[in-house]
Amino acid sequence: MRAPLPKDEAARLASLRQSHILNTAPEEAFDDLTRLAAHICEAPMALISLVDADRLWFKSRVGLMAREAAREDSFCAWAILEPGVLIVPDAATDERFSAHPFVTANPKIRFYAGAPLITSEGQALGTLCALDRKPRELRPEQAKALRALADAVVAQLELKRQRTELECALTEREQLEERLRQSEESIKRIEQKNTELARTNAMFRKRVVECQQTLEELKASEERYTLAMDGAHDGLWDWNLKTDEVYFSPRWKAMLGYEESEIGNSPQAWLSRVHPEEVEVVKAEITAHLKGLLPHFQNEHRVLHRDGTYRWMFARGLAVRDSSGAAYRLAGSQTDITRRREAEEQLLHEAFHDPLTGLPNRAMLMTRLKRSLSRVQHREDYLFAVLFLDVDRFKVVNDSLGHQVGDQLLIAMARRLEDSLRPGDMVARLGGDEFAIILDRLRAVSDATHAAERVQKDLMAPFNLNGHEVFTTASIGVALSVSEYERAEELIRDADTAMYRAKDQGRGRFELFDTGMHSRAVSLLQLETDLRRAIERKEFRVHYQPIVSLKNWSIMGFEALLRWHHPQHGVISPVEFIAVAEETGLIIPIGLWVLHESCRQMREWQWQFPADPPLFISVNLSGKQFSQPDLIERIQQILIETGLEAGSLKLEITESAIIENTELATDMLEQLKALGVRVSLDDFGTGYSSLSYLHRFPIDTLKIDRSFITRLDLPGKNSEIVHTIVTLARNLGMDVIAEGVETGEQIVKLDGMRCEYGQGYLFSKPLDGEAVKLLIEETYQRKPDRNVGAA
């Protein structure tokens, strides 16, 4: 699709011509802005693209070789039609650009984000754009930064145009002055030869006419020069060094809030208003240029406005010299660059500060840490510490009260952390709910621990957020500076390791890093590496624990339990590696392998030992597996490959997997129900909201957590709780399995409560496949009707 022309296309093209930018050589100022745009937008390519009548001409480019391209159906031709940033997430699917050569062939652009270069007259000359070879999105803060950089490009374009016009005007004026000087000399010669001119009257009249024409041309040029000065956006000035008088144009004076008659013509009218911190530099650079040490005068400085504020100005000038090289005039311009400087300062602030809390970000923290580590290398008595904070149960606040309240909590915590620190200390937000603090110039280790205690105490006070009173704690890791470290990342790693140790110890506390923590972290990393290899080396085994009917002690099915046979460390319990598998995502392939192996084994046992009803297999499903979008297809495929009936498979899920996303859980459980697979709710009774969710989901079985069964023989309300769960399940049409059955007294009580099934060491410990086969054979042969008999 070809982009329509802007309504004011002729005026827009005229403005582009007047900018004197087309077909000019590369300039560092524009290239810096282009590189910054690519960096902020995290894109491999960026352009300053000027939209001519039938082409795009690239003033600056990063990651692209072409200097220009056809305007027809280009991205930038569409971008100049919009006031905001044009974002094309995937050009291949956008009918406007899918056939563009830059999309179908090299450089194969898929993502585009372009901010129009809009002049102060409202004309869009082109775009500042970022491009990528892969489809993606642009974050809001990146779009905002791209827009600010586009304004900086426009400022540079405006500055270049005004500089060109000024140089042309000065050249024209000098030429006119030379012509005037020559005319004056001609008139002088005419006067000296008056007697001769009287004899040649005709020639005299002709020369007079020529002089009059010259004077008229000079007058017209002077008028054009005056109009150029009055119409320029810059304030012009002309310093006569012989008389020490300065002509300031009306525009120059208006920039500072004054009328034309309110500022005199002395150099002090300018220099006295320059900021005290910069006036000496301005004077020094003027002097250096007049002495020929600098090719021109150029300086950015602040000048006092009439309203009492300082405005950033860009002043530049060029000396006019006589034949001996001595300067007798200095003329130049002054441009108000306050908006550009503010935009640059804002960009710099955003690059080193967190947009939500206003705290320093990770980049600034690492810069400060490197400086502190450098001091440690040179001063033996210098000591500092790093505190790594993670908000406990922050996800609960987000999920229950919403992300807006979660953001308010982070902002309030940031302010409270700032208030708890000493001058010279620093707090930064690393992202999410993680903060870091640098405690500077400590006298002893106890200063760091006391600071951690103070921070925890301050954070324990409630936060009032939109009428919600929120209590929270933080887990803190403390790492002290050591001279052996040269990289800031090593200190952050130590503090992070100590923080995780604090979480493992119960949260809401702090831990001081020691080398043992690092060793444990390394061991955990090795465990992850071994876990990945375990899949390839087939080191996993499935053991099976019987699930028994409490009416006749018949084996009804088995729960599949994973075991890891490590080649060096022997059998490793799931307690030691399941958390790592969950965190790394390895639980997905491991879980699918367990499911496939268990279904295959159960179908083999059903064929060898037919029973009515047939034996079933119960397999645990992790929260990550449960949230996989292709879970139903995977289960269906496994059932087809192994030949196991869906009704013989029971999937055990935990309450947390359900309540993390109730809408997804409802849909997933209904699909499992439609497939014929049964669902068991594992560890029931330990969750805070179990009862409120039971009626909402199609659950077939409740498994009472072993912690209740273990305490069933003890005095207290445990017996009443178990009885209530059994009664509730029966009323809802669900089966009940008691886990962890180990004594006959527990069997008696459970049977009295009409609990149907039990599982535990009283019946059998988990067994490998061969042992289970022998167990089934033994019970199968003892059963007259050939069903699986008592365990």
Image: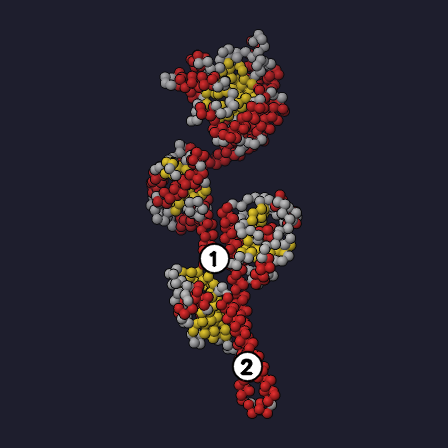
Quarter of image, res 201: bottom right
Q: Residue at x 39, y 37 (%)?
A: 474
Residue at the extreme top: 784
Q: Residue at x 38, y 19 (%)?
A: 717
Q: Residue at x 50, y 12 (%)?
A: 553
Q: Amino acid at mark 1?
A: Arg
Q: Residue at x 59, y 52 (%)?
A: 76
Coordinates of residue 347 in the picture (x, y in percent) = 47, 52
Coordinates of residue 86 in the picture (x, y in percent) = 56, 49
Q: Disc 1 or 2, which lies upstream in sequence?
A: 2
Closest to the observer, 24 or 674: 674
Q: How many numbered marks, from 0 up?
A: 2
Q: Amino acid at mark 2?
A: Ser
Circle on res. 340: 1
Circle on res. 183: 2
Disc 1 is placed on an element classified as: helix
